[in-house]
Image (tube, rainbow, N blue to C red):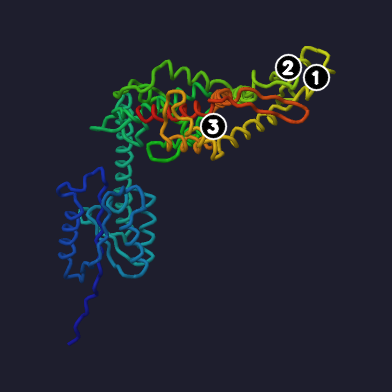
Amino acid sequence: MATAILKRSRCAIYTRKSSEEGLDMEFKSLEAQREACEAYVASQKAEGWAAIRERYDDGGFSGGTLERPGLKQLLVDIEAGLIDVIVVYKIDRLSRSLMDFAKLVEVFDRNNVTFVSVTQSFNTTTSMGRLTLNILLSFAQFEREVIGERIRDKFAASRKRGMWMGGFVPMGYDVKDRKLVINGTEAKMVCMIFERFVALGSASTLARALQSERVLNKRGKRIDKGFIYKLINNRVYLGEAVHKGTSYPGEHDAIVTRELWDAVHAILKESPRKRRAENRSQSEALLKGIIFAANGTAMTPTYTRKGERLYHYYTSMDLIRNRDARGSTGPMRLAAAMVDGAVIAEMRRIIGAPEVAARVIAAQGADGSHMDERAIVAALKRFNDLWEALFPAEQARIVRLLVDRVTVGPNGMAVDLRNHGIAALIRDLNGSTSKEAAE
């Protein structure tokens, strides 16, 4: 007698659960889905069905995408010819998108794989089964879109009530009980950035200063110009919540005042070109009031314009007042950038000389003050890096603190420093550092 050999069908069980649906909910967990599928496969044992050991689970993944690790591995094994039947609890576990599911069915058909839903009995190899499948998928996709609209509406309603709806926490705040609460240390830094932007009028200059001072943002990264612009345009610091460009009163407390916000945005309304021109014109007058010709005549900042460019000079008052300069010595007009550069280079050379620190330390107590020797050395070393980050007004103040007079003659330039200027600069630097640490 001939015995019929039953063909063995290798069944792969696939389970999926979205994070918003609750991975641990009873009857909806991955394990509950697997148990139902295993029971169905066992009921088909007479047909030669047997579940394979490999698990294809996707916990916390949406059915609206095919980018799921468990599904990707399932497709790899299908292409390798390791699977005959795919068993799921419901068809929307495999996909909620009609277009995506059509792609999956194409892969199944190419590899002679049958698709079975435990709670929705149909056969994908027949035209009626395909029609039923498309109808069910259409409703699944409709359900997903309705859920998405409901979530968006809930988000908009919550923002209108001023609630914090998650995302990256802005510097100056922490999240507690799903609400924004002020972080005191970071809030002072936010106010400092707003105030210094008003003083400087330049995000680039402020960014260089903050980088030189090693100020970091909430993520521990260096602050750049882009970060500053995002910060000073973030209405959360006014205590507001914004949704699609519209502001609503927030549940959280404000960090900056309306007056400070308005002062910042009054500057932002000016054209960047105008602000750059103002900063440049300020920086070119670095030696105003302390530069003289060899005959004692003061030299004053002037400029000429060629097209849209400004060229800055220090010009003798004799030339400006049309005086007879035949008896004078030295140039009547000098390029400001050249003179400023020479004076700054001389300042840096003197401050960087080792004997200068030794002289300041040796002179301790002469004026009734005393500074730590290590603080003196550290301040002098820090000056070179700090100088480039200073905005024009700060640079001009330091020059006047250190330089008493600049004299320009036919044989070159002489820079007279103030006797106690370097010590005063060190006290200034250490004093500001101590103040920042105390705050």
Q: Position of residue 176 (x, y in %)?
A: 25, 32
Residue 275 in view of the camera: yes
The residue located at (21%, 56%) in the rendering is: 118
Residue 317's place in the image compared with 184, above or below, is: above
Residue 233 in view of the camera: no
Closer to us: mark 3 or mark 2? 2
The residue nearer to you, when weighing 289 against 416, is 416
The residue located at (60%, 32%) in the rendering is: 347
Residue 21's place in the image compared with 238, above or below, is: below
Q: How far apart are marks 3 and 1 (CA)?
A: 42 Å
Q: Where is residue 71 in the image (x, y as percent from the top left)?
A: 32, 58
The residue located at (43%, 36%) in the rendering is: 373
Circles 3 and 2: CB atoms closer than 8 Å:
no
Position of 32 compared to 146: left or right? left
Decide: few, some or many residues near mark 1? Use Cα within 10 Å; few <14, some 14-19, many ≥20. some
Label 2 sits on a secondary structure element that is loop
Decide: few, some or many residues near mark 3? Use Cα within 10 Å; few <14, some 14-19, many ≥20. some
Q: Position of residue 345 (x, y in %)?
A: 63, 35
Query: Which mark, residue 297?
Result: 2
Q: Distance between the residues labelled 3 and 2?
A: 37 Å
Q: Name the residue under label 1.
A: 328
Position of 58 compared to 242: left or right? left
Please, what is the three-letter code of the amino acid marked with disc 1? Answer: Ser
Q: Position of residue 266 (x, y in %)?
A: 51, 18
Query: Which mark, residue 204?
Result: 3
Circles 2 and 1: CB atoms closer than 8 Å:
yes
Q: How far apart are marks 2 and 1 (CA)?
A: 9 Å
Looking at the rendering, in which quadrant would you find the N terminus?
bottom left
Position of 35 compared to 295: left or right? left
Please, what is the three-letter code of the amino acid marked with disc 2? Answer: Thr
The residue nearer to you, when weighing 316 against 57, is 316
